């Protein structure tokens, strides 16, 4: 079921199916809530599963001049409060993982203020799964790549989207997942030029959240692709070890939900069911 609520005069679109403990699925850059269709359907057998279109993606329009991870986190907190959800678990793919940690930080910060709003405390977040994601900030080289991408999207928007989506898949998987790549490209074209630029700025400027991960390590899991070329796998594994955060490494690259859907589903079910 697709619904929306208003945040700063902008309708935020999301879907919700199933019943039980709430679970929010957070898409990555150039993705939207539709990327979760299969997982959302499977997980809805045991959970109430919500998937949101963040500003600049899917059906939700861009907001302002930059989409920071903090902005996205505030939107998710507004959704939690709008739906009156309790003990929410989060699954974030790539950028969605950055947003999940920003939301955890927001809730931890509000909890430290000893607010009377129980929905704002750290206990509001149940579990966090970072899928093909990292708590690390962009490297200087990666920031320069974001800046070049902003210039390219201004000049060649369609070419940028096509190239960016193909880059998410391993070279050896381009033919095997050609149908999925084409679908992802079509979905990415729902992103406006403004939305893409705003989000690239937010990705470029996001801060490291290793300390946040350390605070929620007992209820977090990082799932990585062994050959992921988008995030720093070895550095992320090192952070997981240093923060005592559980990590699982799957074969393949950055698109584990497409590359190994059955293995990922079993991993999600196992993690979510753990007490």
Image: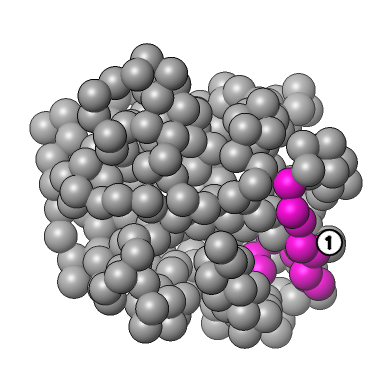
Looking at the image, which residue sits at the far top? 113
Q: Is residue 207 visible?
A: yes
Report helix, strand or loop for mark 1.
Answer: loop
Residue positioned 43% across, 18% down in the render: 112
Locate residue 274, reporting x and y percent.
58, 66
Position of 127 compared to 14: left or right?
right
Whether residue 234 sits left or right of residue 8 in the image: it is right
- At 73% from the left and 47% from the top, the residue drawn is 245
Q: Where 5 sits versus 65, above or below?
A: below
Residue 174 highlighted magenta (yes or no): no
Instruction: Identify the residue under disc 1.
Output: 227
Q: Is residue 88 left or right of residue 254?
A: left
What quarter of the picture does the C terminus occupy?
A: bottom right
Q: Could you tell me if residue 190 is visible in this image?
A: no
Front residue of 243 and 224: 243
Instruction: List x then y, in percent, for residue 193.
Output: 38, 40
Q: Position of residue 10 (x, y in %)?
A: 16, 37
Which percent across, then down, holds residue 201? Answer: 51, 27
> Residue 271 or 225: which is nearer the viewer?
271
Examine the image and state in which quarter residue 109 appears.
Answer: top left
The N terminus - image quarter: bottom left
Q: Residue at x 42, y 40 (%)?
A: 123
- Between 244 and 240, the one lying in front of the other is 244
Neighbour tally class for label 1: few under 14, some 14-19, many 20 plus, Cα within 10 Å: some
Residue beneath the point at 32% across and 55% down: 52
From this view, report whether residue 197 is shown above or below residue 93: above
Range covered by the magenta-colored residues: 245-256
């Amino acid at each position: 079921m697709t619904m929306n609520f208003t945040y700063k005069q902008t309708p935020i679109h999301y879907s919700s199916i199933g019943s039980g403990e709430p679970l929010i699925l957070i898409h990555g850059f150039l993705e939207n809530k539709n990327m979760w269709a299969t997982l959302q359907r499977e997980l809805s057998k045991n959970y109430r599963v919500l998937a949101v279109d963040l500003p600049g993606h899917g059906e939700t329009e861009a907001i302002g001049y930059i989409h920071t991870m903090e902005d996205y986190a505030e939107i998710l907190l507004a959704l939690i409060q709008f739906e009156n959800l309790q003990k929410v678990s989060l699954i974030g793919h790539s950028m969605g993982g950055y947003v999940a940690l920003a939301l955890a930080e927001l809730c931890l910060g509000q909890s430290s203020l000893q607010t009377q709003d129980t929905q704002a405390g750290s206990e509001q977040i149940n579990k966090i799964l970072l899928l093909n994601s990292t708590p690390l900030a962009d490297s200087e080289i990666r920031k320069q790549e974001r800046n070049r991408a902003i210039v390219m999207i201004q000049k060649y928007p369609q070419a940028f989207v096509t190239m960016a989506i193909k880059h998410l898949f391993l070279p050896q998987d381009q033919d095997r997942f050609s149908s999925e790549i084409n679908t992802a490209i079509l979905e990415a074209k729902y992103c406006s030029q403004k939305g893409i630029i705003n989000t690239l700025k937010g990705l470029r400027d996001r801060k490291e959240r290793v300390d946040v991960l350390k605070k929620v390590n007992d209820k977090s899991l990082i799932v990585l692709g062994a050959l992921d070329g988008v995030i720093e796998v070895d550095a992320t594994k090192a952070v997981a070890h240093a923060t005592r955060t559980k990590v699982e490494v799957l074969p393949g690259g950055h698109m584990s939900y497409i590359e190994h859907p059955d293995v990922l589903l079993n991993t999600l079910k196992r993690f979510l069911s753990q007490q």
